[in-house]
Amino acid sequence: MSDFSFRLESQKGHARAGVMHTAHGDALTPMFMPVGTQATVKSLSTEDVVALQPQVVLANTYHLYLRPGHERIARLGGLHEFMHYERPMLTDSGGFQVFSLGEQLAQKGETRLAKAKISEEGVEFTSHLDGSTHQLTPELSIEIQRHLGADIIMAFDECLPDAAGHEYTQESVERTYRWAQRCVTAWEGALRRSVPGHGQALFGIIQGAMHEDLRRRAAQQITSLPLDGLAFGGETIGYNMEGTLQVLDWLREHLPAEKPRYAMGLGREPENIVDAVLAGYDMFDCVAPTRLARNGVLYHGRLEIENDRPVWRSEFPKSRLPIGNAGFAEDQGVILDGCDCDTCSHGYTRAYLHHLYRTQELTYYRLASLHNARLMVRLSEELRHWILRV
Ligand SMILES: [Zn+2]
């Protein structure tokens, strides 16, 4: 019934290499997934996205539900057809934005969005576009994702902050489990197929903040469901690497080897990818590489193998080359020697990128995003090669 399968090819320590079969082709792990929030990786054309050679591209359910609407996208043939992109895609459940956008605006002093209200049924939220009220439920999240038609879809969950107390986290983890069961029912009721007609894999999300007993409980609950993959969510994942690695240490014994492991929102710095792969995570996504690129931060560094162990080395703090610095104004080198991204391989110089950045030229956003996103994708490929090397 499903067009999805995952096969573990090789393991080195905890690090894993695998291959995922989806309705739109095979995808190799470990993988960094560029984020195409509004059905576009910001500033890049679909041909540019193809040039990044990503295994999977992510799109955001919340944004596409509000605009242009999932039903419209389905009428236009689904996300792949709409974007003119033929490779595997993943959509999130919309839950993260529903919970976080109101909060983020409130922190900036904007109070036009009411805080999201959680009930057993789902989450009531106000649109950041026009203030209209909506309710997102597990069933609606699956229905939206069926219309969008990604190859991998996510169960609806509540993303918890690290500060969440034990009592609230317990309540939330139990509710997220019931929501995951409702997602499975909706997905199976639709024969695991998208509205455009191909098979869709469903991944469940393990929450539990930083409470070991509740992370374990969540892992046991979510792995008991007939899901295709397991994701790890919460404020800590990707944001706090120590916590991210701790969570996988707690849970490793509960996780079936044959299911892919997706660390949601991980990939702010290249070394995060190295650490996460060594710990045994298989999939990552993060808006940081393209967002940082737009803000003048270009990744710099390379993967080296020392004593058969991959190590990320960079001459810049946090691997960040600040292209706006005056020191680059006459620098005729490329961003990173030997980089195979379209920007470096075509010979665009640091001096030119510095000028484009300083003058806020639109071309800058594209050239910078191509470099940062390709570096993260290539790093995943290099780690995969290291795992597969005997
Ligand atoms: Zn480059």
Image (tube, grey):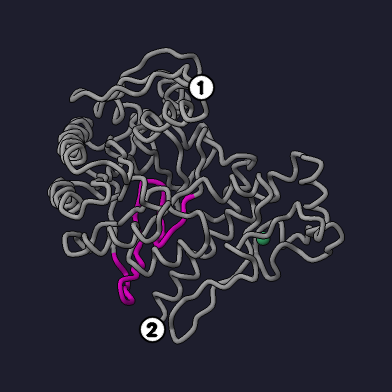
Q: Could you say whether the residue bearing mark 2 is in a helix, strand or loop? A: loop
Residue 136 is inside the magenta segment: no
Q: Is residue 149 above or below residue 350?
A: above
As shown in the figure, which amino acid type bears the numbered disc 2? Val
**Residue at 37% from the left image edge and 23% from the top image edge:** 115
Residue denoted by label 1: 110
Q: Position of residue 294 (x, y in %)?
A: 65, 44
Which tag, 1 or 2, sits closer to the chain's start? 1
Q: Is residue 29 above or below residue 233?
A: below
Q: Position of residue 20 (x, y in %)?
A: 34, 57
**Residue at 57% from the left image edge and 73% from the top image edge:** 313
Q: Which residues are magenta?
A: 8-33
Q: Residues within 10 Å of mark 1 (few under 14, many from 20)?
A: few
Q: Residue furthest bottom?
A: 307
Image quadrant in which the N terminus is located: top left
Q: Main secondary structure of the magenta part?
A: strand
Q: Is residue 356 above or below residue 382?
A: above
The image quadrant in which ligand 1 is located:
bottom right
Q: Nearer the viewer, mark 1 or mark 2?
A: 1
Residue denoted by label 2: 390
Q: Could you say whether the residue bearing mark 1 is in a helix, strand or loop? A: loop
Q: Position of residue 90 (x, y in %)?
A: 40, 43
As shown in the figure, which amino acid type bears the numbered disc 1? Glu
